[in-house]
Image: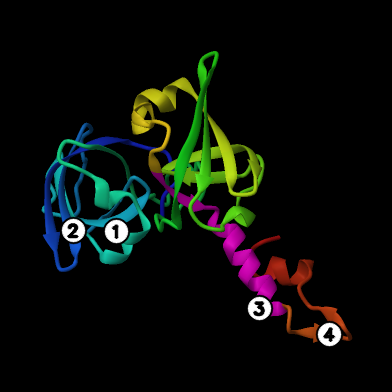
């Protein structure tokens, strides 16, 4: 589990084909304190298992499924990525709940500078717009961001100067593809509501405040 608050960036040192997927080795621009073999690290928003751990270098294997759903297949030697280590129970949840399971990619359709801020517009690659709401949370290349506006498959976010400097956002350009993870809570609620739609009590749907409270959503 992650928060979408990027700890630092990393550079791709090695890239190899591996069993239909890919194998990468990265070097970080921050220290990996207490590295643990097999720990989870989010790379551009994708939860991957790290091995061959050092204080600044580690390797990951990327499955064919992750390659097909994300932009990792296009990463080249020397390319930079956003990185976040897994959330500890004692950590502050400063962003939002991020699983590291990318839903799709989106294309950057516009970039506009507004004072110290940069407004990025996107077009979703799949029909997931029902999970994107104004002022809701969305994860883009592993970064927890707030949706400014949305209409159909199009949405926009505003990037603050700190995020621009601390992540790979400064390298984004119009037409680029980025990884998207929509808010996981919305997906769970939707499935529960659909599952309950066939359960009627006296002609009424039994999805109510009591049901939502029982399952931790109210």
Which quadrant would the N terminus be assigned to in this image? Answer: bottom left
* Residue 66 lies within the magenta run: no
Whether 17 is drawn above or below 30: the answer is below
Q: Which mark is residue 67?
A: 1
Q: Earlier in the sequence, mark 2 or mark 1?
A: 2
- Asked if disc 4 and disc 3 are in contact, CB closer than 8 Å, the reply is no
Q: Main secondary structure of the magenta part?
A: helix
Alpha-carbon span between mark 4 and mark 3: 14 Å
**Residue carrying label 4:** 201
**Residue carrying label 3:** 195
- Asked if disc 2 and disc 1 are in contact, CB closer than 8 Å, the reply is yes
Q: Nearer the viewer, mark 4 or mark 3?
A: 3
Circle 3 SS class: helix
In the image, which residues are magenta?
Answer: 178-196
Alpha-carbon span between mark 4 and mark 1: 45 Å
The image quarter in which residue 65 lies: bottom left
Q: Earlier in the sequence, mark 3 or mark 2?
A: 2
* Residue 187 lies within the magenta run: yes
Q: Earlier in the sequence, mark 3 or mark 1?
A: 1
Whether 200 is drawn above or below 38: the answer is below
- Asked if disc 3 and disc 1 are in contact, CB closer than 8 Å, the reply is no
Circle 1 SS class: helix
- Looking at the image, residue 83 sits to the left or right of residue 89; the answer is left
């Amino acid at each position: 589990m992650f928060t979408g608050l990027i700890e630092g960036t990393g550079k791709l040192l090695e890239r190899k084909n591996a069993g239909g997927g890919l194998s990468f080795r990265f070097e970080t621009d921050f220290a990996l304190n207490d590295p643990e073999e097999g720990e989870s690290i989010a790379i551009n928003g994708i939860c991957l298992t790290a091995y061959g751990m050092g204080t600044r270098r580690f390797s990951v294997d990327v499955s064919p499924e992750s390659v097909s759903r994300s932009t990792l297949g296009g990463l080249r030697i020397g390319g930079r990525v956003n990185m976040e280590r897994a959330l500890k129970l004692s950590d502050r949840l400063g962003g939002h709940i991020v699983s590291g399971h990318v839903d799709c990619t989106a294309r950057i359709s516009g970039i506009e500078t507004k004072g110290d801020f940069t407004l990025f517009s996107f077009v979703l690659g799949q029909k997931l717009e029902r999970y994107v709401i104004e002022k809701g949370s969305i994860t883009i290349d592993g970064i927890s961001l707030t949706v400014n506006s949305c209409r159909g498959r199009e949405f926009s976010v505003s990037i603050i100067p700190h995020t621009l400097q601390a992540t790979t956002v400064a390298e984004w350009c119009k037409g680029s593809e980025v990884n998207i993870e929509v808010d996981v809570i919305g997906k769970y609620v939707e499935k529960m509501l659909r599952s309950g739609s066939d359960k009627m009590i006296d002609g009424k749907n039994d999805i109510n405040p009591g049901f939502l409270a029982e399952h931790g959503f109210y």
